Image (cartoon, grey):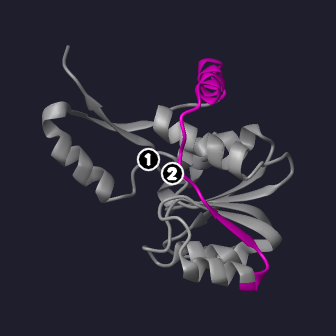
Amino acid sequence: MPLAALTAWQTLVDTAHVRAGQRVLITAAAGGVGHFTVQFARHLGAHVIATAGAARHAWLKELGADETIDYTTTRFEDAVSGVDVVIDLVGDAHDRTGTRSLKTLRRGGLLVAVPAGVSPELAHAAEAAGVRVTPYLVEPDGAALATIAGLIDAGKVTVEVEETFPLEQAGAAHARVEAGRTRGKIVLTVAD
């Protein structure tokens, strides 16, 4: 929980400075970081737009998504516009998701490029589109973790664990994560 939740928190709070009423698009919203990002964006009062496969839509709406887009059938940049902030958890390595996200932003909007950072090409495309782009790297923050723990303890944020693996099956767990399309987190259990 700490790394994924802190990543979600810092992208929204420390990097994007999301405020109530802003429109936030989250790619890979059903994943380990994404499901926290949806909940934190909702907690901050944002209008949350989430991309995920259709099987995850009802769950994402329970978490706080206002709109969902099935990325397997719909190009999200064709379905949404006027977004204030995009939290891109996919990147350009897969289907140029980061670059495509630029088309959803309002003029002056912000793309937070989480997995791969900002390539020179992405920076140039953002400048040409009149939007901002920034990379992101999680940093230790005890105060933010305490806030996150408080939200979880109060039942305002949930931690989704899709599957657990014993430590001896770490390779299988890693393969499961690499295959993508997880709902929340994959956890390794360590015997006492």
| Residue 13: percent from left, percent from top | 72, 43
Q: Secondary structure at mark 1?
A: loop
Using the numbered discs, state the Cα–Cα distance from disc 2 to disc 1 in whole angstroms: 5 Å
Residue sitting at x 78%, y 49%: 18
| Residue 87: percent from left, percent from top | 63, 58
The image quadrant that residue 156 belongs to is top right
Q: Which residue is mark 1?
A: 183
The image quadrant that residue 123 belongs to is bottom right
Q: Nearer the viewer, residue 12 or 39?
A: 12
Q: Which residues are magenta?
A: 128-156
User: For the residue carrying disc 2, how many other residues have a C-alpha within 10 Å: few (<14), some (14-19), or many (20+)?
Assistant: many
The image quadrant where one finds the C terminus is: top left
Of the numbered discs 2 and 1, the one sitting upstream in the chain is 2
Q: Which residue is mark 2?
A: 30
> Tags 2 and 1 in contact by the CB under 8 Å rule?
yes
**Magenta run includes residue 146:** yes
Is residue 55 shown above or below 159? below
Residue sitting at x 59%, y 48%: 60
Residue sitting at x 27%, y 51%: 176
Label number found at residue 140: none
| Residue 4: percent from left, percent from top | 49, 41
